[in-house]
Image (cartoon, helix red, strand yellow):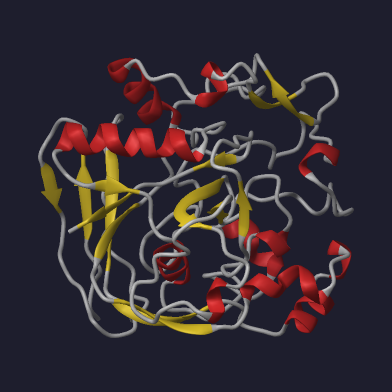
Amino acid sequence: MRRRRAFLVALGTPVLLVAIACSNLAPSGSRPANSEAEPAGIALVMVPAGEFVMGGTETAEALVAAYPTSGKGPDYFADEYPAHRVRITRAFLLGKFEVTVAQFRRFAVESGYRTEAESDGTGGWGCNAGTGKCEGRRLHYTWQNPGYPLADTQPVVNVSYNDALAFCRWLSKKEGKPYRLPTEAEWEYANRAGTRMRYANSDDPASLPSFARAIDLSRHARFGHVQQIVVSPGDATAFPAPVGSFAPNAFGLHDMHGNVWEWVADWYGATYYAESPVDDPPGPPSGEMRVRRGGAWNSFPVWLRSSFRNWNTPDSRCVNLGFRVARDL
């Protein structure tokens, strides 16, 4: 069976080629060789060229029936349709993991960059230890203080779209390589890794704990907004897990479901799927909202599906929002 290839990029060091393979056909789903990053490095996985069907894999009515506690009607899922053929014409590199606290700290220290939460006078979002609820915006919440114990290996949060782009520009200059955010189409293609299920690893929400950090439904059965969820110290699924803690998908990418929402490059267009080109869709040419994908540690299963689309303004930041980088070959 063909093996997918992974790259390792350690900041300030040459690229280490672990293996190489790509295909212009639909991906086979074989798992790539693993690679390990230096503490401040970015591990990249080669995503092969190929094609897939982007968007909802079942009808909106079926989703309403499958996730009854969400209280959502069919219109809530309208922007996932129509399902449409997409061809990714060139292989590309995608972060094996979400960008971590340690990696973002190196960027901030070396560049002197201050995030929008730190510089615009409004702060970010965080978890209030007294109430157990997420709240924002508050001045004291930033990527350095999200209100929970922070580990270097956790994904960075409280970063805006603009902060993510700043990181990519810094990394591009440092490495002499063109880093960027993935497009929405690239992200879903990489997430699915050759599958047509609700999640890359399964159709069953009950299987999520094996490959995703998501909300514990045994503790949080009632569907609610991030501000309504009470997180207790004994909740094992509280807060983001260190990246790579869960099983990867068939491309060898970790945390493509859950942990933190991930910024992608596209402007949001509710009806864009009806007019999307087949080859390498770039998203709408303009807009007011940017797309985030994948769900987070405090997200319900309906939001972790491969086709679910989320969006907000480019300056938004939250206690469950981060990113991963992409790079052209």
Please tell me which residue is depicted at 54% across the width and 18% down the height of the picture: 118
Please tell me which residue is depicted at 25% across the width and 81% down the height of the picture: 1
Q: Is residue 302 above or below residue 99?
A: below
Give residue 262's position: percent from left, percent from top. Answer: 51, 49
Q: Is residue 193 above or below residue 299?
A: below
Give residue 206's position: percent from left, percent from top. Answer: 71, 66
| Residue found at the far front of this picture | 286
Residue 38 appearing in the image: no
Please tell me which residue is depicted at 72% across the width and 71% down the height of the picture: 77
Tally of marks: 0
Q: As rendered, which of 323 and 116 lies closer to the eye? A: 116
The quarter holding residue 63 reads bottom right
The quarter holding residue 268 reads bottom right
Q: Is residue 115 left or right of residue 261?
A: left
Give residue 326's position: percent from left, percent from top. Answer: 32, 52
Q: Is residue 8 left or right of residue 40?
A: left
Q: Is residue 322 left or right of residue 319?
A: left
Give residue 272's position: percent from left, percent from top. Answer: 54, 72
Residue 162 appearing in the image: yes
Q: As rendered, which of 186 and 282 lies closer to the eye? A: 282
Q: As rendered, which of 224 and 87 lies closer to the eye? A: 87
Q: As rendered, which of 181 and 35 lies closer to the eye? A: 181
Assign the C terminus to one quadrant of the image.
bottom left
